[in-house]
C-alpha cells in the first residue's frame, strides 16, 4: 500500500468538514429562530431540527464512509459495501437522532421559558421580544455552529467506525487507528497531545483528560458517544483507521 500523505489528507478533509459545518449551521440558525417565533405565537415548540440533522447525517456519513473505505481498500470495486452501509446507516440515524433532537429542543425550550419569565413583565412588543431573544446565545448563529460542528463530527467519526469493520472484513488483517486533531479556534490542548502520529489497536482506547474532574476517561475515538460533553462538544478531531501492516511498516506502532 502506498504511503499516505496525512497532512494533505487532513487538509482536504478539513475543507470538506468546514463546508458541511457552515452549510448546516445556517440551516440550524434559521430553524432556531423559527422555533422561537412560532413559540411566541403559539406556545408550542415546533420540530425544525430533525429534517436538518437527518440530511446532515446522511450526507456526511456516506461521504466519510467512502473516504475511509477508499483510503484502505485496494479493491477496484469501491462500492462493495456501500449498499449495506446505506441500509445500516439509515437505521442508525433514525435510532440516534430522536434522542439528539430531544436534547437540543429541551435546551431551547428551557431557555425560552426562563427568558420569557424576565421579558413578559416588561410588556414588550412581539418584534422587540423576538429580537432580544434572537440575540441570546441559544438562538444565535454561535449556538447553531456549535450544534453543526458537534453533529458533523459525530456523523463523520461514526461512519468511519462502521467503515472500519467492512475494511477489516475485506483486508483480512487487523485494523489500527490514529487520533487526528484538525485544529480549531479554541483547541483542547489535551486533544492536541493525542495527535502524535502513533497508532493503537482498534480495540484499545485513548485515556483522555477530563479537566472538570482532574481524571481521564476512556475514548474509543473522537466523538465517542460514551464520552463526556467536555470532550465532544465543538471537538474538531477525527479518527483515521489504517491496516496493521501499514502502521508497522511506517513506524506508527
Image: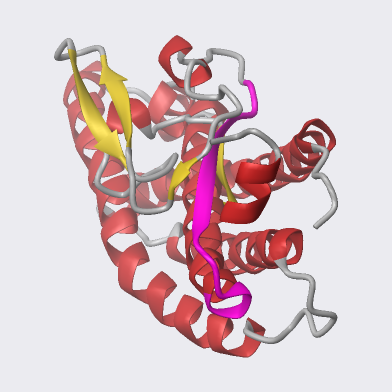
Image quadrant of residue 69?
bottom right
Q: Nearer the viewer, residue 86 or 43?
A: 86
**Residue 94: % across, % down:** 38, 75
Residue 129 in view in this figure: no
Q: Give the range drawn in magenta.
A: 169-183
Residue 211 vs 177, above or below: the answer is above
**Residue positioned 80% across, 34% down in the render:** 11
**Residue 147: % across, % down:** 47, 40
Residue 61 vs 34, above or below: the answer is below
Image quadrant of residue 19?
top right
Residue 119 vs 177, above or below: the answer is above
Q: In the image, is 115 to the left or to the right of 93?
A: left
**Residue 62: % across, % down:** 64, 69
Residue 72 in view in this figure: yes
Q: Which of 144 and 18 is in front in this view?
A: 18
Report if residue 171 lies within the magenta region. yes
Residue 54 vs 156, above or below: the answer is below
In the picture, the quarter occupied by the N terminus is bottom right
Q: In the image, is 147 to the left or to the right of 44?
A: right
Q: In the image, is 36 to the left or to the right of 42?
A: right
Q: Nearer the viewer, residue 156 or 240?
A: 240
**Residue positioned 32% across, 73% down in the render:** 95
Report if residue 170 lies within the magenta region. yes
**Residue 46: % across, % down:** 36, 60
**Residue positioned 84% across, 35% down in the render:** 8
Image quadrant of residue 98?
bottom left
**Residue positioned 53% across, 36% down in the render:** 253
Amino acid at each position: 500500500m502506498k504511503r499516505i500523505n496525512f497532512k494533505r489528507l487532513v487538509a482536504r478533509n478539513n475543507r470538506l468538514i468546514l463546508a458541511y459545518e457552515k452549510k448546516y449551521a445556517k440551516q440550524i440558525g434559521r430553524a432556531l429562530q423559527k422555533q422561537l417565533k412560532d413559540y411566541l405565537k403559539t406556545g408550542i415548540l415546533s420540530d425544525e431540527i430533525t429534517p436538518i440533522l437527518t440530511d446532515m447525517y446522511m450526507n456526511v456519513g456516506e461521504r466519510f464512509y467512502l473516504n475511509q473505505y477508499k483510503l484502505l481498500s485496494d479493491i477496484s470495486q469501491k462500492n462493495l459495501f456501500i449498499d449495506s452501509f446505506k441500509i445500516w446507516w439509515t437505521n442508525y440515524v433514525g435510532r440516534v437522532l430522536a434522542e439528539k433532537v430531544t436534547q437540543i429542543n429541551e435546551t431551547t425550550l428551557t431557555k425560552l421559558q426562563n427568558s420569557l419569565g424576565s421579558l413578559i413583565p416588561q410588556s414588550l412588543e412581539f418584534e422587540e421580544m423576538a429580537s432580544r431573544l434572537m440575540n441570546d446565545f441559544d438562538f444565535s448563529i454561535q449556538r447553531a455552529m456549535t450544534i453543526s460542528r458537534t453533529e458533523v463530527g459525530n456523523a463523520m467519526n461514526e461512519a468511519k467506525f462502521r467503515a472500519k469493520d467492512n475494511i477489516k472484513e475485506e483486508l483480512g488483517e487487523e485494523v489500527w487507528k490514529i487520533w487526528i486533531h484538525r485544529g480549531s479556534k479554541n483547541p483542547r490542548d489535551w486533544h492536541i497531545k493525542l495527535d502524535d502520529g502513533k497508532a493503537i489497536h482498534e480495540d484499545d482506547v485513548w485515556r483522555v483528560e477530563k479537566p472538570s474532574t482532574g481524571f481521564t476517561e476512556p475514548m474509543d475515538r473522537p466523538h465517542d458517544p460514551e464520552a463526556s460533553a467536555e470532550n465532544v462538544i465543538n471537538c474538531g478531531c477525527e479518527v483515521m483507521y489504517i491496516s496493521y501492516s501499514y502502521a508497522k511498516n511506517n513506524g506508527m506502532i
